[in-house]
Amino acid sequence: MRPALVIGVGNPYRRDDAAGREVVRRLRRRVRGDVRLAEHGGEGAALLEAWEGADLVILVDAVASGAAAGTVYRFDAADGPLPATLLRDSTHAVGVADAVELARALGRLPRRLLVYGIEGEHFTAGVGLSPEVRRAVRGVVASILQDLQAGGERDG
């Protein structure tokens, strides 16, 4: 199996938007071997380049659907299109959900693509996660470690 890649998406200066990046930072102390970690601004077309060559890609992004802060979503791209309304916010023309569907159409999806969404509360300028999102980040780190151990084949 080629290397696994975990991508944390977000803007580090928009508070809870940095949740994905924080997950990757916490994983740096916990993963070894052929697991690559990357922080990414979330520009959709560039994501296709970022995951090139990886069999298992786990992507983490903050979402703003109106659910309670800290709510965690997990999607397997093999199950069908990602909910575009959940992963729609981006400062770029092509967001995460659009990038995944573009990759699907172009035959450029990794063998396995898991997407985590963490519901944010504060997306204004500034640094630091809200307490609910910080707690959710800890849970997502634990879930990703399980995913990596299972090679991405874990349910739920």
Image (cartoon, rainbow, N blue to C red):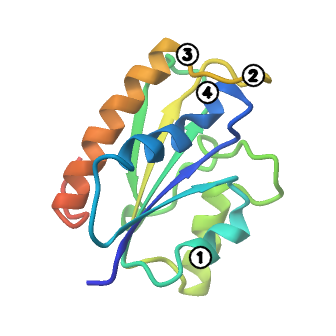
Residue 111: which quarter of the image? bottom left
Which is more N-terminal, label 4 or label 1? Answer: 4
Which is more N-terminal, label 3 or label 1? Answer: 1
Secondary structure found at label 2: loop
Q: Residue at x 48, y 22 (%)?
A: 133
Q: Nearer the viewer, mark 3 or mark 2?
A: 2
* Residue at mark 3: 130
Asked if the residue at tag 2 contacts the one at tag 3, i.e. Cβ–Cβ closer than 8 Å, the answer is no
Q: Position of residue 8 (x, y in %)?
A: 53, 50
Q: Residue at x 51, y 18 (%)?
A: 69
Secondary structure found at label 1: helix
Asked if the residue at tag 3 contacts the one at tag 4, i.e. Cβ–Cβ closer than 8 Å, the answer is yes
* Residue at mark 1: 103
Amino acid type of disc 3?
Ser
Amino acid type of disc 2?
Gly
Q: Position of residue 87 (x, y in %)?
A: 61, 45
* Residue at mark 2: 126
Secondary structure found at label 4: helix
Q: Nearer the viewer, mark 4 or mark 2?
A: 2
Q: Residues within 10 Å of mark 1 (few under 14, many from 20)?
A: some
Amino acid type of disc 1?
Ala
